[in-house]
Amino acid sequence: MSAAILSLADVHKSFGPVEIIRGVSLTVGANERHAVIGPNGAGKSTLFHLISGQLRPSAGGIFLAGEPIAGHSPQAVNRLGLARSFQITNIFPRLSVFENIRLAVMRSHGLQYCFWQWVDRNRRVREQSEALLESVRLGHRAGAVAGELSYSEQRSLEIAMTLASDPRIILLDEPMAGMSREETQYTTALIREVTQGRALLIVEHDMEVVFSLSERVSVLVYGRIIASGTPGEIRGNAQVREAYLGEEATA
Amino acid sequence: MKVRMVLLAAGVCVLAAAPLLLSDGLVNAAISMLIAALFACAYNLLCGQAGMLSFGHSAYFGVGAFATIHAMNAVDGAGLLPTPLMPLAGALGGLLFGFAAGWFSTQRTGAYFAMITLAIAELLHAIAPQLKGVFGGEAGISSMRMPAWGWDFGSTTEVYYLTLAWVLASLAGLYLLTRTPLGRLALGIRENSHRLRFLGYEVHRVSVLIFALSGMFSGIAGSLQVLSNESANYVMFDTSLSAAVVLNTYIGGVHAFLGPALGAALVTFFGYAVSDLTQSWLLYQGVLFVLVIMFMPTGLAGLLDLACGSARRYGARAVAPAAGLYVLAGGAYAAALVFLTELLQRLFSQDYRSLAQAAGAGHWPPVRMFGHDWTPLGTWTWVAPAALIVAGWLCWRAATAVVRRLQEAAPAVPAGAAGMASPGRTA
């Protein structure tokens, strides 16, 4: 296995007396596509919030390329090379599609306090924004208002925004939620294509997507990873089948 | 785009020619309009573009004003800077105070942000009369414009041109700011600051910077006011000024760059023209604000946009009758409102009650209004406003019918879809 880009060591998270994450250890290798699956309420989104800096873990360590990031702010985590999308579409709804992407691209060009140059004249930002839009096949929609795109187009836009900072790892939280079959197939291919050369950590409920897309799968149940392995291993794991994949429920 | 440039050039020419055509009193009014327009645009950078609704923007206007008056009085009254450059002092004052206040207030968003800005302005308003050395106590501080660069700044006309130059330069600066990365980020903060964080932006720092820049341009507006009045008083920190800029900005429309300037100039002008004629001016201003918020949240600029958009879509000739009817309807309603307000205001006034008492029970002396005597129980006194209301209603119905026919003949694009998508728009 290649060197780990992201590793979690015995991460805990409690909200008051309620412990949501109860000791998660997880490793994602560079260029690895890794899926986290688990029943509703298992803590998958919480895990993403902990990694991306939205929440601070109660205990344990999170390392991005060996550097501790537990408790860092979202913007600090992002600048270290981790970008994420959200379960509920999280874009700039009343701005144009191009403007959405440009906001995402500008950051990596260090333009955040810049008021001495025209943004339209910055060729590198414009070209990179256009290339990103093309890569998610939204080039023809550049002038549209983002909030008026179709649902799957908005999800594609989210993925493009996630890629804008050229991160080393991206986290996608249920990118296919609410999509039709065709849209799901299309988005799966898109994700496979745009995550070339970087690591992916994905939460997804659609098992077909999970098993076709990922190289490793971890199963999160009630705040613990109960199994981690290749799709084949996970499919054959009796404990996983019992807990999650729809065999008889545990007592 | 070309049409816009021509309109802009024409507007600047009209503004430049104004002192040649207007009386001294009107030039003074024009100075107030220009200052209010700049203040509203500075406010809109924060409110309309970055989505931060401040309720205490008089603070930055006032700080700019006092920074200027002290700069004018420095060096034994000779002034720290030549008079034409005095607004730089106001800009610096507004910028620095904007940084300090912005650092606190942008820690929170929404209602909490608004409350903090309100508290900061109230703090200044409460503390200013106590600090006699800085704010001159209740009396305030006065000063003199010093001659510089061959002008003596003794006439209203010279002050007008100084104000015009600074307002145009500041508006240009504010507009160009919207074309920079920081200006685009302001829109991102308004739309979704949470997402910006996950794109790696230090949202708080960007917000403080935008807040401070808004404070800086507000400071320039305050400074111009001081140059015009040659005095500054702690009353500048009053809530009414903070409220006025919010009202002006929304009446004009927060989504168009020059909307707030339009609103501020119009409201200031009406204030100047009407406040001598009626005691109910504040009521009219309030009614106008409520109507704008309820029926046209995009403000007067949005209304113009709608009119121009319809004219493009259906042709100016087809739209003109509807527009004319709407104007007639609005005029008739406004006339009825003014008539009733003025009548009731006179009937309930102290003067009228003593008159009525003197006339004896059952006698209602006539009220003098619009050059006529109106008896309170006379038929015409009530038929006139009723007729206006009916006429307004008929015009409105006719206009709506015309619009419906136009829409049925040529179904329109869904409202809002066309205008907002064009990338050239600032908001």
Image (spheres, coloured by chain):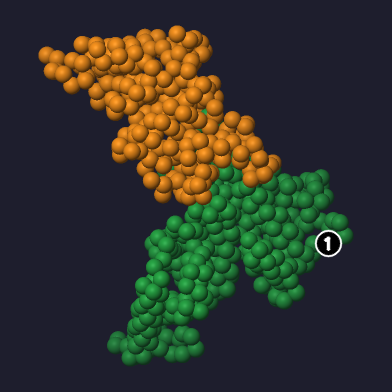
Q: Which residue is mark 1?
A: B152
Q: Quadrant of the N terminus of chain B?
A: bottom right
Q: Which chain is green?
A: B
Does residue B243 appear to the left or right of B82 in the view shown? Answer: left
Does residue B113 appear to the left or right of B70 in the view shown? Answer: left
Report the residue at 48% width, 85% height from top. B370
Report the residue at 37% width, 84% height from top. B391
Residue B235, by quadrant, is bottom right
Q: Specify the farthest residue to the right.
A: B150
Q: Position of residue A163 (x, y in %)?
A: 50, 30
Comparing A239 with B147, the one in front is A239
> Can residue B226 be seen?
no
Report the residue at 52% width, 25% height from top. A167
Mark 1 is on which residue type?
Asp
Q: Position of residue A184 (x, y in %)?
A: 34, 35
Comparing B302 with B312, the one in front is B312
Q: Is residue A109 above or below residue B376?
A: above
Q: Secondary structure at mark 1?
A: loop
Comparing B231 with A143, the one in front is A143
Tell which subunit mark 1 falls on: B
Comparing B324 with B57, the one in front is B324
Q: Residues within 10 Å of mark 1 (few under 14, many from 20)?
A: few
Q: Is residue B101 above or below residue B413?
A: above
> Can residue B425 be seen?
yes
Residue A225, by quadrant, is top left
Does residue B412 appear to the left or right of B71 in the view shown? Answer: left
Count of picture labels: 1
Report the residue at 77% width, 57% height from top. B144
Q: Position of residue A56 (x, y in %)?
A: 41, 20
Residue B295, by quadrant, is bottom left
- Of the chain colours in the picture, the one used for chain A is orange
